[in-house]
Image (cartoon, coloured by chain):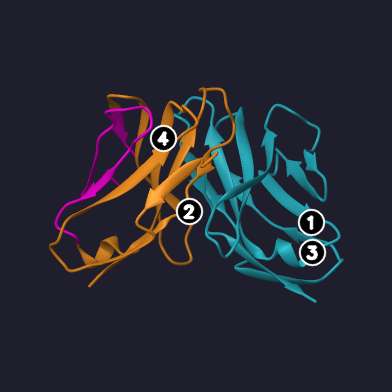
Amino acid sequence: AQTVTQSQPEMSVQEAETVTLSCTYDTSESDYYLFWYKQPPSRQMILVIRQEAYKQQNATENRFSVNFQKAAKSFSLKISDSQLGDAAMYFCAYRSLDSNYQLIWGAGTKLIIKP
Amino acid sequence: NAGVTQTPKFRILKIGQSMTLQCTQDMNHNYMYWYRQDPGMGLKLIYYSVGAGITDKGEVPNGYNVSRSTTEDFPLRLELAAPSQTSVYFCASKGRWWAYEQYFGPGTRLTVT
């Protein structure tokens, strides 16, 4: 069975600086999807970025980018120019291609932005 | 566009009571999901549905039931509530099978005492 591990329960960063959140996963599959979701205090889960395992190029979305290391089974999220609105819980999630699209979730990392 | 809505937002139940958590989506999505999120944990899948009339168990289905009589609605039923069911419950939906993103509702915080 697949597992997702986020080893940093909490991270803090100064506003306008860069922070990297870590995620590792375990799978025997060769093709899959990985996601980062943001959960602000409002509790609503918001998709931040996704990565298809068959793509070597790292995904980017504006200030958010990933470092996908398939052999190492690592999927970190980099947030550049951190803003106060980035403060939230961040969850890493894995999705198998042939499941009924169930997401396997990490435990989350709380990101604190210092003004 | 309302997206995924859930009611109620908060609820306190006594042990042994029952209740239904409502979930509705207005995006004509086939796939719908129920998750629970315990403190300090990621989400765990309770039940999911791939279309009206079709439901299946997820990782933690015990103590819950679902039905899917319409595309829009996917209620979650708790029978004989137990303290272990204290959690935040999220409903989510997704369009086609190839679609990446699940759209989440705002959650229901349930306390069983």
Quadrant hosting residue A19: bottom right
- Residue drawn at (51%, 23%), measured in percent from left and top? B97
| Mark 1 secondary-structure assignment | strand
Q: Which residues are magenta?
A: B55-81
- The residue beneath circle 4 is B32
Q: Identify the mark nearer the N-term, 2 or 4.
A: 4
The chain whose colour is cyan is A
- Pinpoint residue B70: horizontal percent, then vertical percent: 31, 28
Q: Amino acid at mark 4?
A: Met
Instruction: Farthest residue to the front: give it.
Output: B1
Q: Amino acid at mark 1?
A: Ile
Q: Amino acid at mark 2?
A: Pro
Chain of the residue on which disc 4 is drawn? B
Q: Mark 2 or mark 4, which is nearer to you?
A: 2
- The residue beneath circle 3 is A83
- Pinpoint residue A60: horizontal percent, then vertical percent: 80, 41
Mark 4 and mark 3: Cα distance apart in space:
33 Å
Q: Mark 3 or mark 2, which is nearer to you?
A: 2
